[in-house]
Amino acid sequence: MKLRHRISLLAGAVLLLVLLICAGVLLLYARRTILTLTEDQARNKQSALAASFASMARYYAADTDSDAARESLIRYCFARFADQEGVLLRGDDILYSSVSVNPGEYAQPDKQSVAAALFRGPVDGRQLLIVASYEWVQADTYYVGLVRDITEVYDAIGRLTRLFLLVCGLGVGLGMGLLFFVVKRSTAPLSRLTAATGEIAAGAYDKRVAVSGRDEVSDLGRSFNQMAEAVENRIDALTAQNERQRLFIGGVSHEFKTPLAAIGLHGELLENAKLSPAERADSLRHIRRSGAYMNRMIQSLMELLLLDQGIEKEETEPAALLSAVAEAARDGLSARGVTLITVCEDAAPLPLNPTLMTSLLLNLVENGARSYDPEDRNKTVTLRATDRCFEVSDRGRGIPAQAQKHIFEPFYRVDKARSRKQGGSGLGLALVKAIADAHGAALSLDSQPGRGTTFRITF
Amino acid sequence: MQNRILLVEDDQAIADAVALNLKIVGYDCVRFEDGRAAADSLEADHAFDLALLDIMLPGMDGFELLSYMKKYAIPVIYMTAKADAASEIRGLLDGAEDYVTKPFDMMALMVRMEKVLVRTGKLNRIYRAGDVELDDYRHEVYKAGKRVDLRPLEYNVLLFLMKHKNLTVTREQLLSEVWGFEYMGESRSVDVKISSLRRKLGLNDAIKTVQKLGYRLEDR
């Protein structure tokens, strides 16, 4: 059962009950008031009738002797005041009556007093009100009654009751209709929320609900939209991450295919072809280089993977880091005829992972060394540590402006052929970026083609 | 007249291997590492029977380079590390003759090259090794200018050796190529044909026995 139906039904029942109680109380009060008024009126009339009849009868009765004359007088006196409601009895004799019932059977007043007796109830299918009292004229006791047909009063009360019930019914119907409309209006946003939830669950993460007003349902709508926003952002982030990883894996497999093809082809040549000693040596050299290239790539990949598992930092003296980098870079640089200059200026210890930071700086230093052509002179790379900052600069060929924003992407190469020839893995600067990110350090570069490049890591 | 092949490949190791292989079996191979340089050179020299193109090239990529090749009606075989179906379909839809993905083996590439050359009618069917010439147009073999009669199987063995000059061919390759896949005979039959070829054409030194593998017709 829907919430709006339940609320409407419940409220309708309460409304009905309240209306019925109110109507009942009003009805009972009205009935009592009407009956009391009717009775009082009848009482007064009977009392006046009795008193007038008695006083007139007593006045004239003294002058009559015979019973017959007295009876005529009594009848006359009564008829003088009574209308068709009046009834006069003496014992069982009906002296005056224009009604078909004998009131003496229903209302029996006390014979010792003048107090009136009252009867109200159904007689022969009619509702009758009977008021009666005794009067004494000389030695005789007279029963003075008033018989009033109040069926119409009861009918009026019945009509009133039906009217009340009708009003109650209409009120409940109208109230429930109104309530249903209001509840439906205020729960409509819930239906929309339900529909939106379904759509989001089915994958429409950009779905939002329209929110208006300031009630709880609107608050729910706003919260819902916030939640949907958060879910969508998260999904987008995950999708983007997934896409990056997919591209990365695609890049890795693509990058492996080239050296694999070279190894395969030269292996085939060595196995099958008649080659000169120089050709054999060339083939072997290509195989060895391709293998070394793949090995470098695997090492970089392993480091990238390890970075994902979080890093441990320790307070490290920049000076110690610089000498570790210089030590590691020495052989590679001297083979290229490049000199490494290390400068340590007023650098306080920094929280970092020394192994990874050495790898980062080494990558930058080697990158700097590769920026020179073999015939260049004064080939130097400067590694500088200042306060919370490392700088690696060369005076080599520099990086073209349009390449600068791609330079940290995996497998991006400014010059593909030269990079591989000079021993790049295509991952070096991607690794640099990943290590800097893992340390929360900012990585920037400043390069001018033909003038050289400076990389800067700022903690 | 050797078939001239244009090779555009930026990886030096692969280019070296392919070029050397083509050279020793008797193709004339012109190399470029840069796509733009290859395209620019065509105006002056476009007498190529076939082009082998990498797709990811510096200067100009292989897809773009294809339109230059079409201009001079040079058929193209792509050789690339892009193994996705979309690249392959694009390459073939654009009008490339074939598509090989790295890593590939040279034997397979040469079979595809030969098929393309046959299809375009440009295959050079005159093969030479030393003073022996095989004219596959007329199905004749000459030794120092004089015709030599060969049995059909001998001719086919020599043709296969000529096509893979300076490369080792295995007995199994010869069997399946010359005798056919169904032939389940002994590799001994190969040895018999080889020795009669050596005798009839004086190729005792030129046809080398490669231990445990097969034979190699050497000419360099």
Image (cartoon, coloured by chain):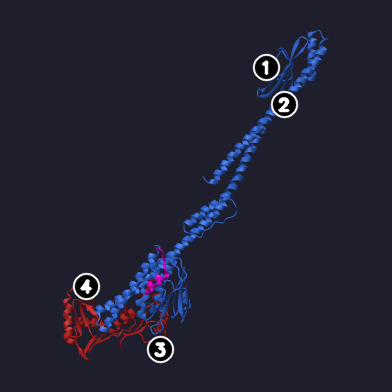
Chain colours: A blue, B red
Amino acid marked by disc 4: Glu
Mark 3 or 1, which is nearer the eye? 3
Q: CA distance from mark 2 to mark 1?
A: 21 Å
The answer to which quarter of the image holds residue A360 is bottom left
Q: Earlier in the sequence, mark 2 or mark 1?
A: 2
Q: Residues within 10 Å of mark 1 (few under 14, many from 20)?
A: few
Residue B44: assigned label: 3
- Residue B157 pos. (x, y %): 21, 81
Residue drawn at 50 percent across, 58 percent down: A230
> Magenta residues?
A311-326
- Image quarter where the N terminus of chain B lies is bottom left
- Asked whether the residues under the numbered discs 2 and 4 touch, taking CB atoms below 8 Å apart as contact, a structural biologist would say no
Amino acid marked by disc 1: Glu
Amino acid marked by disc 2: Thr
Amino acid marked by disc 3: Ala
Q: CA distance from mark 1 to mark 4?
A: 136 Å
Q: Which residue is mark 4?
A: B182
Chain identifier of the residue bearing label 1 in the image: A
Q: CA distance from mark 2 to mark 3?
A: 133 Å
Chain identifier of the residue bearing label 4 in the image: B
Q: Secondary structure at mark 2?
A: helix
Q: CA distance from mark 4 to mark 3?
A: 49 Å
In the image, residue A364 sits, relative to residue A153, either above or below, namely: below
